[in-house]
Image (spheres, rainbow, N blue to C red):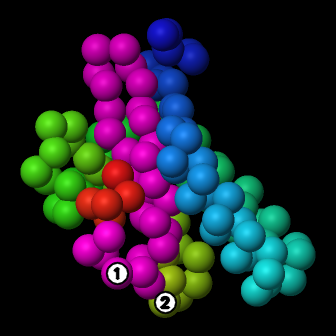
Amino acid sequence: MERTEEGKYKVIITIPAEKHFYELLDYFYEHYPLDRAEEIANELRSTAKSLEDQPERGAPEIKLSHRQQKYRYILYKRTPRADIKIIYYINIKINTVYITDFFPTEKDNRIISERN
């Protein structure tokens, strides 16, 4: 695998993360006006893609600290009270970021470990 551009990392959304992303989209399209649901979906994708530039900026994910990989997360603010954690780890050797989950913060944090 190679960098997309000099200094950038490749961002890969894992199959489980993709499943969680589409579950969120189903929720958005059911509970929000179409324009807002599409806006959230696009912003969420852009936020995930932004990890190409500085993936180390995310905070450590404490619920996954027992894992071999060093999981991190960045937050996407969906509403003033509801965020989505984009959970990922970095393989520095191949300059790749693996997104493992799109986790709504209103869910019980104890299930993060089960999902990742």
Amino acid type at mark 1: Asp
**Viewer-side residue, 19 vs 2:** 19
> Which numbered disc covers residue 81?
2
In the displayed structure, would residue 78 be above or below residue 14?
below
Tell me the chief SS of the magenta region: strand
Q: Residues within 10 Å of mark 2 (few under 14, many from 20)?
A: few
- Residue sitting at x 30%, y 75%: 109
In the displayed structure, would residue 21 be above or below residue 107?
above
In the displayed structure, would residue 37 be above or below residue 72?
below
Residue 54 lies within the magenta run = no
> Which numbered disc covers residue 52?
none
Amino acid type at mark 2: Arg
**Viewer-side residue, 14 vs 54:** 14
Report the side of 69 relative to 98 (left or right).
Answer: left
Q: Is residue 51 visible?
A: no
Q: Position of residue 106 (x, y in %)?
A: 44, 84
Discs 1/2, front: 1
Q: Picture quarter containing residue 25?
A: bottom right
**Contact (Cβ within 8 Å) of mark 1 with mark 2:** no
Q: Is residue 46 visible?
A: yes
Work out which residue is located at the far right of the displayed protein and give it. 34
Q: Position of residue 52 (x, y in %)?
A: 49, 33
Q: Position of residue 21 (x, y in %)?
A: 61, 57
Q: Residues within 10 Å of mark 1 (few under 14, many from 20)?
A: few
**Residue at numbered disc 1:** 108
Q: Which residues are magenta?
A: 84-111
- Residue sitting at x 49%, y 89%: 81
In the displayed structure, would residue 8 be above or below residue 50?
above
Distance from disc 1 to disc 2, alpha carbons, whole Å, reads: 15 Å
Sequence-first disc among 1 and 2: 2
Q: Picture quarter containing residue 73?
A: bottom left
